[in-house]
Image (cartoon, rainbow, N blue to C red):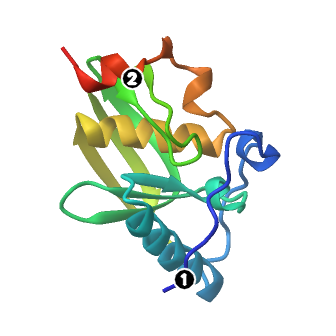
Amino acid sequence: MGLRKILTVDESALHKTCREVTSFDWKLHKLLKDMKDTLEEADGVGLAAPQVGILRRVVVVDTGEEILELVNPTLVETSGEQTGAEGCLSVPGKYGLVTRPSYAKVRAQDRDGNWFEAEGEGLTARCFCHELDHLDGIVFTEVMDRFLTEEELKNPE
């Protein structure tokens, strides 16, 4: 099991734009495996490469049915709107009120460079948008309306 250290919001790598992946080799495969292991160990729903200190356009997302590997992902379609609590493995213990699309479709490459599309609603759509923001150096605290209080987290409406 290859676990990687998850960087916290004060570390500069989280605020930089990531470079496109051009080599679909064993290094990428190892990064993806390590990111999956790290995501599962941290009990998260998404993890972007800059969160583990790698400035490449790579994301893993747990859809509830599978862990998707997204290499060089882009949002190709969004619709609707949802506002709700959002957290981040790089901002431990803090949650904010964030508005995201309620539906999102991404186009990405797999670990071997083949293009595909994936779509999701609700939490998966939120996660796609959140993780792709990371690839452009954006942390959710920069797009949230406000932090949620402990009382709000205990008693959601």
Quarter of the figure with residue 102: top left
Asked if residue 151 is positioned above or below residue 49 in the image, the reply reads above
Quick check: marks 1 and 2 in contact, CB under 8 Å? no
Disc 1: CA contacts within 10 A as few (<14), some (14-19) or many (>=20) = few
Q: Which residue is found at the position 45% from the left and 56% from the top?
A: 108
Q: Is residue 143 visible?
A: yes
Q: Is residue 40 left or right of residue 27?
A: left
SS assignment at label 1: loop
Q: Nearer the viewer, residue 145 or 155?
A: 155
Cα distance in 3D space between marks 1 and 2: 33 Å
Q: Position of residue 46 (x, y in %)?
A: 42, 52
Residue on which the image places disc 2:
150
Q: Is residue 71 left or right of residue 83?
A: right
Q: Position of residue 59 (x, y in %)?
A: 50, 57
Q: Position of residue 96 (x, y in %)?
A: 46, 23
The amino acid beneath tag 2 is Glu
Q: Is residue 114 visible?
A: no
Q: Position of residue 139 (x, y in %)?
A: 61, 34
Q: Residue furthest right?
A: 12
Quarter of the figure with residue 41: bottom left
Quadrant (top left, top right, bottom left, bottom right) of the C terminus: top left
Residue on which the image places disc 1:
2
Q: Which residue is found at the position 27% from the left and 45% from the top?
A: 119
